[in-house]
Amino acid sequence: MKRILFLLTTLYCIAALGQKNIYESPNFDELSEDHAVLAIIPFLTNLDLNEPISREEQKRLEENEGYAVQNALETYFSRRSKKKKLPVKFQNIKNTTAILAQNNVTYENIDVYTTKQLSEILGVDGIISGTLDLNILLSSGIPTEFSFTDYISGGADYGRIGIKISDGDTGRLLWKYEKEINKKTGKNTTDLIDRMMKLAIRKFPYERERKRDRNKN
């Protein structure tokens, strides 16, 4: 009985800590009231692989991982929009990439642009962006072998991801979701994003009715 209570307490604490990884601006409703289209940009990636590679190769791999998250998020929102009508649409990432390229915005320099600048360039109301810290190539899939020793030593921890939504007009942070990456969070980038967003679905602000619509009801 004591063991069961201990396990339940542990699970509760983990769940509580998980909730703290999600932030929503108290001004979300006000700032997002007129949002119609959001753009998803490639994530800024930091790779720390346990193998010697050239700086050029590392940059290439980091870019690949960043674009993989962008693609995974578009896939998730595309599927989600078919199940439930969301109050916003998401700019096709091919269009996003093309518009950025036309304005000389590349993966290497995108971080020097503000949210307001990127929103104006892309013609959207908000930006979905984020960071990715990895010690493996997540897009290629994580190791499938199970080792209890890995969980004890931390060998099953592969990094951390942070997803954020920012308002285009003000540049202010509206929503942020951070999560550690390990063997239980997903077998690859697409699986990770799918599981993350499903866990956060009740906390994703665009899932609920807009304040003006709630007031009507």
Image: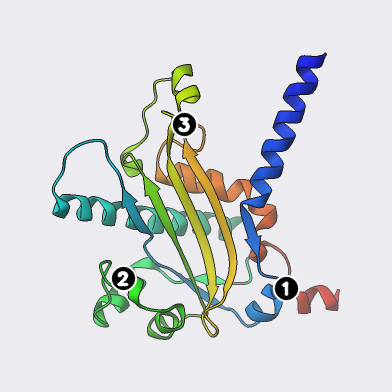
Answer with left or right where residue 189 lies relative to residue 211: left
Name the residue located 50 percent from the left edge and 54 percent from the top edge: 76
Name the residue located 32 percent from the left edge and 39 percent from the top edge: 136
Task: Look at the image and tell me whether residue 135 can be seen.
Answer: yes
The residue lying furthest to the front in this view is 153
Answer with left or right where residue 18 lies relative to residue 123: right
Where does label 3 land, which residue? Answer: 183
Name the residue located 66 percent from the left edge and 44 percent from the top edge: 17
Give, as a three-letter code, the residue at label 2: Thr
Which callout, 3 or 1, points to the residue nearer the camera? 3
Give, as a three-letter code, the residue at label 3: Lys
Element marked by disc 2 = helix
Of callouts 2 and 1, which one flags the residue occurring earlier in the amino acid sequence?
2
Task: Look at the image and tell me whether residue 95 can be seen.
Answer: no
Colour scheme: rainbow
Of callouts 2 and 3, which one flags the residue occurring earlier in the amino acid sequence?
2
Where does label 2 land, which residue? Answer: 97
Give, as a three-letter code, the residue at label 1: Arg
Viewport quadrant of the N terminus: top right
